Amino acid sequence: MDEKASTVKGEVVVEKIKRSLLVWRVPPSTTGKVILTLRIYI
């Protein structure tokens, strides 16, 4: 995550997103490329 380019300023929010992404695993049945898009509307 590029924290310098991030428009999300809440450190708590950024840390929660980081933790969630670190523990997320691609389902075993997935083949090919996985693209994850995160959109936050404030």
Image (cartoon, rainbow, N blue to C red):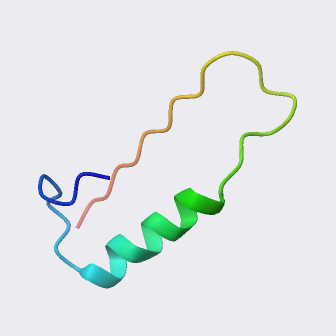
Vertical order, 36 against 38 (above or below): above
In terms of depth relative to the viewer, which is nearer, 37 or 28? Answer: 28
**Where does the C terminus fall, quadrant-wise?**
bottom left
Residue 6 vs residue 11: left or right? left
Residue 8 vs residue 12: left or right? left
Q: How many marks?
A: 0
| Residue positioned 68% across, 15% down in the render | 32
| Residue positioned 17% across, 57% down in the render | 6
Vertical order, 6 against 30 (above or below): below
In terms of depth relative to the viewer, which is nearer, 9 or 1? Answer: 1
In terms of depth relative to the viewer, which is nearer, 41 or 28? Answer: 28
Q: Position of residue 34 (x, y in %)?
A: 59, 27
Q: Position of residue 9 (x, y in %)?
A: 16, 74
Q: Residue furthest right?
A: 29
Q: Quadrant of residue 40?
A: bottom left
Residue 11 vs residue 13: left or right? left
Q: Quadrant of residue 12?
A: bottom left
Residue 25 vs residue 6: left or right? right
Q: Position of residue 22 (x, y in %)?
A: 57, 59
| Residue positioned 76% across, 18% down in the render | 31
| Residue positioned 56% across, 65% down in the render | 20
Q: Quadrant of residue 10?
A: bottom left
Q: Residue furthest top?
A: 32
